[in-house]
Image (spheres, grey):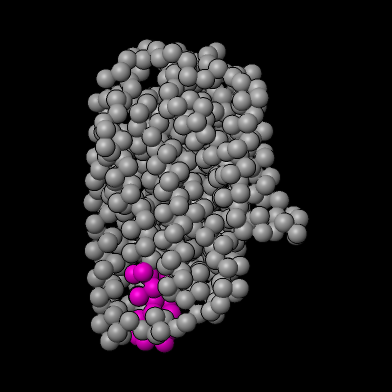
Amino acid sequence: MATEKLIELKTDVSHSSLYNADLAPTTLEERNWSTYNFAALWVSMAHCIPTYMLSSGLIALGMDWKQAIFTITLGNLIVLVPMLLNAHPGTKYGIPFPVLARASFGTFGANIPAILRAGVACGWFGINAFIGGTAVNNFFIALFPAWKTFGGDINIAGLSLPAMITFIGFLVMNILLVYKGMNSIRKFENWAAPLVLIMTFILLVWIVNEAHGFGPIFAETGKLDTWDKFLPVFVPSLTGMIGFWATLSLNIPDFTRFGKGQKEQMLGQAIGLPPTMTIFSIMGVVISSATIVVYGKAIWDPVDLLLQFSNPLVLAFSLFGIIVATLSVNIAANLVSPANDFSNISPKHISFKTGVLITGVCAVLIMPWKLLSDPSMYIFNWLNVYSGFLGPIAAIMIADYFILRKTELNLEDLYKEQGEYSYTKGVNIMAVLALLVGVGAALIGKVVPSLSWLFDYAWFVGFGASFVSYIVLMKIMPVPVGAEETVTEE
C-alpha cells in the first residue's frame, strides 16, 4: 500500500470565528495513532453490552443464531466501506468530522449534519450510561437489598430513585474521563480492549462448564425457516445493523485525524470492527444459551446476569468488567463526536468540554430506558430511522470528497468565513437539497404504507438517492472545487 503524504496547515487561522483549539487540524507530530491503537479502539467500542445483546433482539424477532450472526457480520462489513472512505480525509488533513463537513455543506451549513449526528450520539450516550448505571444499581441491590426500596414510591420519568441516581452517577463518570482529553482516551482504549475480551472469555468458559455444554439455542431452528418468512425480517434488521455504526462512519475523522497514515487507520479498523462484532455477538449467544441450562431461562442482558451471583467478589469483578466495557464505547463513540459537533456551532463560545456537558444533558432528556424496552422499537425504529438520516450525509460527504474534489481540499479555507467553502451565506444549498432527497426517499415508507419497503432499506435508499442527486446538482449548478493548496506538504 503506497504511503500518501499527509497535509499540515502552516497558516495561522486562529483569529477566525470558525477556529478553536479543539477543531484545529492536528500537526504531524500529533498524528501518533498506530494500527494497534485503531484496532484497540474498535475492539473496545464493539465489546459493549448493546453488541452483546444484538443477537437476542434478532432471535426475539424469529431468527435462529446462525441467521442472527450472519446479519450482524454482513451489516458490519457493509458499514466498514463508508467508514474507511470518510476516514481518509481525517488522516490526510488532520481534521475532525464537522470541519470535513464544511467542504460539502459549507462553513455554516456543516452544522446541519453535525447536529443530526450529535442528536444520535446523545441517544447512544444515554443508552450506554443507562446500561452502566443499571449494572451499578444491581450491584448495590445485591450487596444492600434495602437500596432497592430507597426513596419509596418516588418515580422519575419511569425510573425509581435508586435507578436514576446510578444512571446520573455513571453518566458523570463518563464525562469526567473525557475531560482529560483525546490522549487519555487512546490510553484507556489500549488496555480496555484486551481486558474486556479476557473477562468475557472467562465468563463464557465458566458458564459453559456449569451448563456442561452450549445449551439449547444452537439446536433451535428459529421461526424464519423459509425465504418468504426470513426476508421481511432480514432486510430491516440488516439496515439496523448498519445503523448501529453508521454514526461512526460519519465522525470517524474525529479519530483518524490522529493516525500516522492511511495504512494504519485502514488496517486497524478492518481488523478491529467486523471480526470483533461477530465474535462478541457469538459469545453473547453462547453465554445466554448456557444460562438456560444453569438458571432455567435465557439471560441475554449481562447486567441481569449479575443478579444471579451471590459472591461479593464475583459481583465486584463482573461489575468492573461491565463498567470498563460501557465506558470504553461510550466515551469514544458517543462523547467525542457530539462535543466536536456542538463546538462547531460557535467555536469561539462552545469548547469541547462545554459540548460534552451539552451531550450529557441531552442524554438524560432522551430517556434511553424507553428505547431499550422493546427490541422491535430498538431495531426497526430507533436504528432504522436514524440510518435514514446518516446514510444520506455519508453519501454527500463521500461524493464530494472522492468524486468531485478527487481527495483535494483547501485546508486553510475550511477555517475561513469567506473562502472556497463559504458558498452562499455559508451554506451549500445543493448539499441541503441532496440531503432532503435522500432522507425523504429513506423515510417516506414510514408515512406512505405502499412504500414501506423503502424504509426497510432506509440506509441504502438514502445513501443512493443523496449520492446521485448531490453529484447531479453540483454538475448542474457548479461551485468552485479543488482550489489550489495553501498548505505545506510533509
Give the percent coordinates (x, y) of residue 328.
34, 51
Between residue 89 and residue 405, name the one nearer to us: 405
Where residue 261 sits in the image (x, y, percent)? 28, 33
Residue at left 59%, top 31%?
471
Can residue 7 be seen by looking at this rendering? Answer: yes
Instruction: State which quarter of the image contains the N terminus.
Output: top left
Kindly indicate the quadrant of the structure image that contains residue 475.
top right
- When the figure is inspected, residue 463 is found, relative to residue 345, above or below; the finding is below
Q: Specify whether 250 is left or right of 289.
A: right
Picture residue at 39% right of the left edge, 37% below the top: 87
Please report the residue visible at 53 percent of the width from the left and 58 percent of the height from the top: 240
Q: Is residue 260 magenta?
A: no
Percent of width and height locating residue 62 = 54, 75
Relative vertical location of residue 399 with respect to residue 223 in this rendering, above or below? above
Q: Quadrant of the C terminus?
A: top left
Is residue 297 a member of the stretch shown in magenta? yes
**Disc count in the image?**
0
Image height of 241 relative to 145, above or below: above
Along the viewing direction, whichever of 202 and 240 lies nearer the viewer: 240
Quadrant of res 23: top left
Most common SS among magenta residues: helix
Q: Nearer the viewer, residue 479 or 123?
A: 479
Residue closest to the eye, 21 or 456: 456
Lateral position of residue 194 relative to residue 456, left or right: left
Give left or right: position of 155 versus 20.
right
Residue 175 visible in this rendered orientation of the protein:
no
Look at the picture and state if 40 lies above or below 251.
Answer: below
The span shown in magenta is 282-302
**Relative image position of residue 139 (x, y in whole percent):** 37, 68
Q: Residue 114 is drawn in which quadrant?
A: top right
* Residue shown at the point (54%, 57%) measured from the top left: 239
